[in-house]
Image (tube, rainbow, N blue to C red):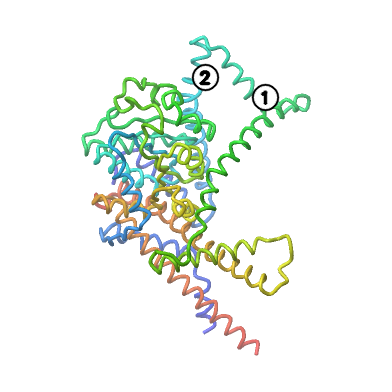
Amino acid sequence: MSHEPIVWLGALVTLALYSILYRENALYRAAEHIFIGLGTGYGIYIAWTTILYPQWWQPMTKDGQWWWIFAFVAGALYYAIYTKRFVWMSRWIMITMLGLFAGMEFKGWTGSYLPQITASFKPIIGPEPPYIDFSNLIFLITLVTVMVYFLFSFEHRSRIVGRTAGTGRWLMMVAFGAIFGSTVMARMSLFITRLYFLFHDWIHWIPDK
Amino acid sequence: MDQFADRLARIDRRLIFAMVALICLVPLVTGFSMRAIVSPPTQKLYDAIEKTPPDRLVVLSSVWDAGTKGENEPQTEALMAHLFRLKRRFAILSMGSPQAPTLAEGIADRVAPEFGAKYGEQWVNWGLKTGGSAWLQSLPKDVPGALGNKDWKAVPLSQLPVMKDVKTFHDNVGLVVDITPSGTLGAWVAFVGQPYQVPIGFACTAVMAPEAYPYLDSGQIVGMMTGMAGASQYFQLLNRKGFVTQAMTAQAMAHFLILALIAVGNVGYFAGRRVDRQGGA
């Protein structure tokens, strides 16, 4: 077994967190709150030491760049939301930031998705090997049927539209299944890593690789 | 028969958890491992790093924290080992995740001695940066300016040989790999990859992979490493041994168990339904 206190602490907290698998209990709650508190505290420390202090406080107080005070004023405007009298001030900063980020999102959207729309025009008969054509055909069917499913401007009364939309729904179910499978895989990876920590670092049952 | 069906459909979840834990432990304790089959997206990412020009910097955007260590840590280790082996310069950048610079630097410190690499010569940590998309748009145009001319421990960039002549992404950066459990890929593609013609690679948690395939399909990303499975494949490409190889075997066995349990649960469900029908008739 490990002789390092930090490993023991990590192991005991890991076991406390996994105790939820048996039943809800106070140990689990305590470990959960400690984790959240530590994460938040560490985040504040890193934010101050690597961002706020060197990039804002130091230039403002030591390098004579007094105009950085306006960053504080702008940030403080958010907190005006807590007073009825000054709530209008918080809206100024919010609408400014909303406008700024909406513009950036629009730019980001075109940069991200327009190339994907272009790439969705795939040949189903072309110079590629037949399995690529077949793959492109499945892609095309999925694209069209799922798009038909999301046509909400009219009711899907027509048999053709209804069945096409139904096929789209089934194909989306396949995609959701794949996503759920990936989620299980991701969670299992995290669990195995913790098992490795417990049985390798803590009680030394697993030999070194 | 009805009792048997009922038991199958009502296996205590705690028993299932214990079975999963036990089956995962077997390969970890015995050292039994199965060979990973390298997927095309992982191979593409490996090839992209191989092809990176030696005079250009690689940026590892490390945005993960302790919550996804199991997946993102082996990915980061694999990428760093590859870059150290090829003697490519790289920078660690963490946007919005306070734990990320420390975790990524810990891996670099652990792997670097194997290759005789030194901080400041072959790699640099740019540290935590906030400001999201707005800051990211300023970075490619003026790298030292956006970083405040310092690394994350306030060492001037001019004192670090790894940052020599690094001015813009277009001229000096050969590849960006986004190692992440969150949705940062879109920003890299839109604000860096497309406008500055910098290839983007992606190393994500398994949950994120299905959403990233359209980027791979359209050529917006040059390759992708998916979760622990991708890391295990990358380790195999590097011919590198590590915990992740056994971990993937453990995961495969857990998946077999889950499939078997799904089958058992369904047998119990349908048998119970049949008994109910016969009882009703």
> Type of residue at label 1?
Leu
Q: How packed is label 1: few (under 14 Cα within 10 Å), some, or many (20 or more)?
A: some
Subunit of label 1: A
Choose top left, top right, bottom left or bottom right for residue A133. bottom left
Q: Residue at x 67, y 70 (%)?
A: A161
Q: Nearer the viewer, residue B143 or B264?
A: B143
Residue wearing tag 2: A56
Q: Distance from label 1 to label 2 (Cα)?
A: 17 Å
Which of the two labelled residues, at mark 1 and mark 2, occupies the earlier sequence position? 2
On what subunit does the disc labeled 2 rest?
Answer: A
Q: Which mark is residue A77?
A: 1
Q: Percent position (x, y) of residue B26?
A: 31, 61
**Residue B49 percent across, percent down from the top left:** 32, 44
Q: Is residue A203 above or below residue A145?
A: above
Outermost residue to the bottom: B281
- Give the quadrant of residue A92: top right
Q: Position of residue B20 (x, y in %)?
A: 41, 62
